[in-house]
Amino acid sequence: MHEAPSHGTEPPAHGAENPSHGVGAPLRDLRVLDLATLFAGPLAATMLGDFGAEVIKVEHPHKPDPSRGHGPSKDGVGLWWKLLGRNKRTVTLDLSSPQGREVLLRLAADADVVIENFRPGTLERWGLGWDALSEANPRLVLARVTGFGQRGPYAQRPGFGTLAEAMSGFAAVTGEPDGPPTLPPFGLADSIAALSTAYAVMTALAGRAHTGRGQVVDMAIIEPMLTVLGPQPLWYDQLGYVQPRTGNRSANNAPRNTYRTADDRWVAVSTSAQSVAERVLRLVGRPEFLDEPWFATGAGRAEHAAELDEAVGGWIARHTRDEVVSAFEQAQAAVAPVYDVRDVMADPQYRALDSITSVEDDELGPVKMQNVLFRLSETPGAIRWAGRRHGADTDAVLGGLGLSEAEIAALREAGVVR
């Protein structure tokens, strides 16, 4: 089980020990500056913060992270930010100003990681490129998350996850055969890039343990999608094979599809293993298929997907979703109900894992959100607080750097902080 969140925890001053991290938080000695906006970079920082890293979210004084206004809100409070901004201390700082540059360099001198997603050359234009940051802190890891990477003909293009979903080949293989390429209705490429960035940061930190030096992580959002799409480049290189759109069917096995139940709900069936395919056809009362020569391989079954879908779909259509799931479980065949978020919130397996947990928030009270990504038996992560107000920790963080109240007031008067 996950470590229970510490409700109502107030982040400590910069440089102070954070008791809410606990001695078991594996990243409790890590300090991360999150300069990025929207999803891939900030979500990577969230993942580090979930396991104890002290994450300082740096936002422009007058242009907060757009995720604060993305999607639905309650009482004027953006809900997406509550998830993306959790476990982060929020400060405001105009990095393009000389005073903001000096403050950022002071923060970087005592940090382990900086995550940014500005267009290539932007940090350099502000005097905050790798040369300046590494001079301030030779052990710093700088993660640069952009649509197309730091070099190449597209490097200066604005990049978003949608473009990666299109250019990676994902959209081309998603959707019905006679329909258009299909994009996901959520930030798939950004989320995969965030996971990859968190992994890259930890890898760079492991390298630092050997060399004593930091380095630059160049993460192009278009690249992680290529990995999760599997061996398509290898297939094309060796066979000239281009994977087509097949809807919910697979070219590698069948039956594999979604099927409507008698109570107008849906289930998904997968038969990647031959033994499971055999169990499914016995369950639906069509054992004669097992004697067909083509049934012996996944590819052979995929060539007869229409026949198998008719057999399986016809049986499922005569039973309710609960009846289908129960029968498949008894037969040890692979099935899952097609959930929407209401089902997820009520599911006993998710509840047993505490996958959706409750966090106390000073603006909204208790809020439910996804828990930390995985469970560690000895050093678990925790959600210590949900996303905080814009600039909530500016004074505390800058005071922790040694700036006086008068100096902070002067920065505020100059518009460098809010």
Image: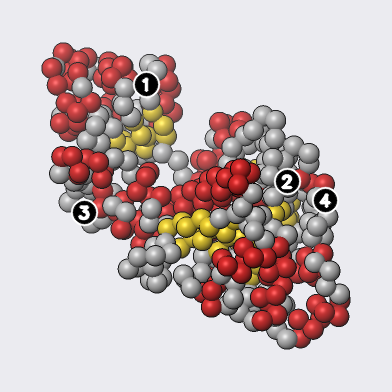
Between 73 and 157, the one lying in front of the other is: 157
C-alpha separation, residue under disc 4 versus residue under disc 3: 56 Å
Quarter-of-image position of residue 41: bottom right
Q: Residue at x 17, y 33 (%)?
A: 306
- What label does residue 28 carry, if any? 2
Please identify the quadrant where the N terminus is shown: top right
Q: Nearer the viewer, mark 1 or mark 2?
A: 2
The earlier-in-sequence mark between 1 and 3 is 3
Amino acid of disc 1: Ala
Q: Amino acid at mark 2?
A: Arg
Query: Which residue is located at x 20 percent, y 44 percent?
Result: 236
N-term-proximal mark, 4 vs 2: 4
Question: Which amino acid lies under the numbered mark 3 shown in the image of this protein?
Answer: Gly
Single out the mark in the foreground, 3 or 2: 2
Q: Residue 281: x and y, percent?
A: 26, 19
Residue that sits furthest to the right in the current view:
405
